[in-house]
Amino acid sequence: MTDSAAGQSSENLLEIRQLKKFFPIRAGIFQTTVGHVKAVDGVSFFVKKGETLGIVGESGCGKSTIGRTVIRLYKPSSGKIIFKNQDITRMRESDLRTHIRKDIQMIFQDPYASMNPRKTLKSILKEPLATHGLLDDHSDDRIAELLNRVGLSPSYMNRYPHEFSGGQRQRIGIARALALNPELIIADEAVSALDVSIQAQIINLLEDLQAEFDLTYIFISHDLSVVRHISDRVAVMYLGNMMEIAPKSTIYEEPLHPYTKALLSAVPVPRKKGMAKRERIVLKGEIPSPANPPTGCVFHTRCPFAMDICKQTTPIFQELKPDHFVACHLYNTGS
Ligand SMILES: Nc1ncnc2c1ncn2[C@@H]1O[C@H](COP(=O)(O)OP(=O)(O)OP(=O)(O)O)[C@@H](O)[C@H]1O
Ligand SMILES: [Mg+2]
């Protein structure tokens, strides 16, 4: 990855450089480490203030691990995480709490799982305020305002989580994420469990909130059409690696990486009039295990265009055109 891909601009809210997260595989009665799952294996990207970066890729490619490592729920194995020009890679928990825990919030696929079923909506929404010592006489008003803002009636304040539908629970999850006035929200499969019509409502809500509160989003999903709706730029992952990052229209209309092309050819994506018909690329074989990824380009075992060099050398993630990064030897021949 080149430095330019890591992004040097101060407009970047977040910069990730060569981030790796390996999970140990333990075996035997002594639980000795016998290998590592290379869930995230050296990815670099940046997120500009106010934008939405979509991250797509098949199950197990490392999307959630990136999200969790970026907010330091997981300790990074190596690499750098720079948030608001501050290196938070090795920051201690106490410092994280004062510096970034409020600024970065996450929204999950199943907000219900993290809600205490015996607590009312009011106390659920008070939790983040209490954690950060922000409870005061105005907290009830703040919670009513949050509920209004996410499209729920403040009169629901004394109800319990089970009384709400899936879409309503996701609105509660969003209200909880907003409670601390964050700058960055990482949404991990936030609409994946919802019906299509509800998905659209939640995405519209997220877009409205982004404009109103100047929010920056990382929107993680395996669903290419959902990502297309909400993202400004899209990052495509495969087996712990970034394959391609580009503005949305470029990714969907002029993808360069064979993996991106294969992903897109597998789903019906509307084409603009006059655009060339997309070739259908069917990938052979299974996704290899991240515990034992292929040498060279991790995609070479399934790539219809694989060359000898692909088996030996990891392609550089380079900026081929402005704002368009690709890791592929097909485009690397001159360098
Ligand atoms: N806590 C963990 N301990 C060990 N291995 C893990 C852990 N979390 C994830 N992994 C492994 O790391 C790899 C990446 O997982 P991750 O959950 O990040 O993928 P994902 O892209 O979010 O997939 P999905 O689309 O299914 O949510 C997988 O092989 C997974 O089994
Ligand atoms: Mg995931």
Image: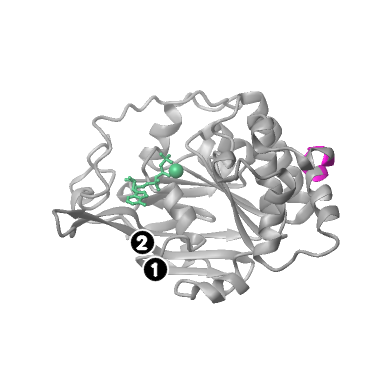
| 260 left or right of 155 in image | left
Q: Quadrant of the C terminus?
A: bottom left
Disc 1 element: strand
- Does 142 sit above or below residue 111? below
- State left or right for residue 323 relative to residue 59: right
Instruction: Give the residue displayed 47% in from the left and 60% down from the top.
Output: 73
Q: Is residue 55 left or right of residue 309?
A: right
Q: Position of residue 301 (x, y in %)?
A: 22, 40
Which numbered dot is residue 242? none
The span from disc 2 to disc 1 (Cα, nearest Å) is 6 Å
Q: Nearer the viewer, residue 6 or 240?
A: 240
- Residue on which the image places disc 2: 20
Q: Quadrant of ligand 2?
A: top left
- Say the numbered circle drawn on residue 79: 1
How crowded is the residue under tag 1: few (<14 C-alpha within 10 Å), some, or many (20+)? some
Please identify the quadrant where the N terminus is shown.
bottom left
Instruction: Pick the residue in front: 50 or 315.
Output: 50
In the rendering, at what x and y percent does residue 270 appear? Answer: 57, 25
Q: Which color mode does the image show?
A: one colour
The residue lying at 47 percent from left, 37 percent from top is: 222
Asked whether disc 2 touches disc 1, contact meaning CB atoms under 8 Å apart, the reply is yes
Type of amino acid at the residue the image marks with label 2: Lys
- Residue under the image location 57 percent in, 43 percent down: 248
Q: Is residue 150 magenta?
A: yes
Magenta residues span 148-154
Number of marks present in the image shown: 2
- For the residue marked with disc 1, what is the amino acid? Gly
Disc 1 C-beta below 8 A from ligand 1: no
Residue 87 visible in the displayed image: no
- Label 2 sits on a secondary structure element that is strand
Mark 2 / mark 1, whichever is N-terminal: 2
